[in-house]
Amino acid sequence: MLVEEGAVEPVNAQRYAAHRLSVEMLLDRVRNARLEGYAYADAGIVSGTRAVAVPVFDGLGQAIAAISIAAITDRLGSARLGSHVALMRRQADAISRRLDEVTRARRRVP
């Protein structure tokens, strides 16, 4: 069971339906994002857009944030997705390293 299964409330089903999602579809997206290492929305909330997001991890390997981009459909197609994800992962890794440095420095301050 995913942690999210307990967090996804059936009472939100109407909200999901407004975006053509079911609870099961949402949980499938979470599972897929974990497997792929990024989340990709082929159809964004705004018509004619797509979006992709990558996680930012803390020093313990827990996802604590994400960075994302959204673009018009033509600019975020499958041909360019891999290069966008690679660039975003590099930035997410840089953020993670910096957060770890700051955390370690704060522990040393009396």
Image (tube, grey):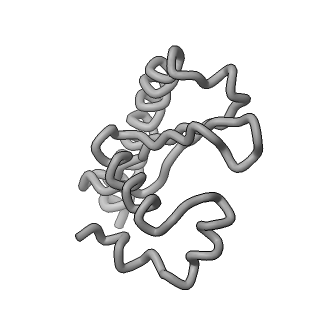
| Residue found farthest to the bottom | 11
What's the residue at 70%, 36% (across, down)? 49
What's the residue at 24%, 55% (across, down)? 60
In the displayed structure, does residue 66 sit left or right of residue 35? right
| Residue 48 image-quadrant placement | top right
Image spot of residue 25 (x, y percent): 44, 59
Residue 39 drawn above or below residue 58: above
Q: Nearer the viewer, residue 8 or 22?
A: 22
| Residue 16 image-quadrant placement | bottom right
Q: How many marks?
A: 0
Figure quadrant of the C terminus: bottom left
| Residue 24 image-quadrant placement | bottom left
What's the residue at 39%, 43% (across, down)? 96
Q: Nearer the viewer, residue 33 or 68?
A: 33
Figure quadrant of the N terminus: bottom left
| Residue found farthest to the right | 47
In the displayed structure, does residue 107 sit left or right of residue 47? left
Image spot of residue 100 (x, y percent): 35, 48
Residue 97 drawn above or below residue 73: below
Image spot of residue 3 (x, y percent): 30, 71
Image spot of residue 89 (x, y percent): 42, 31
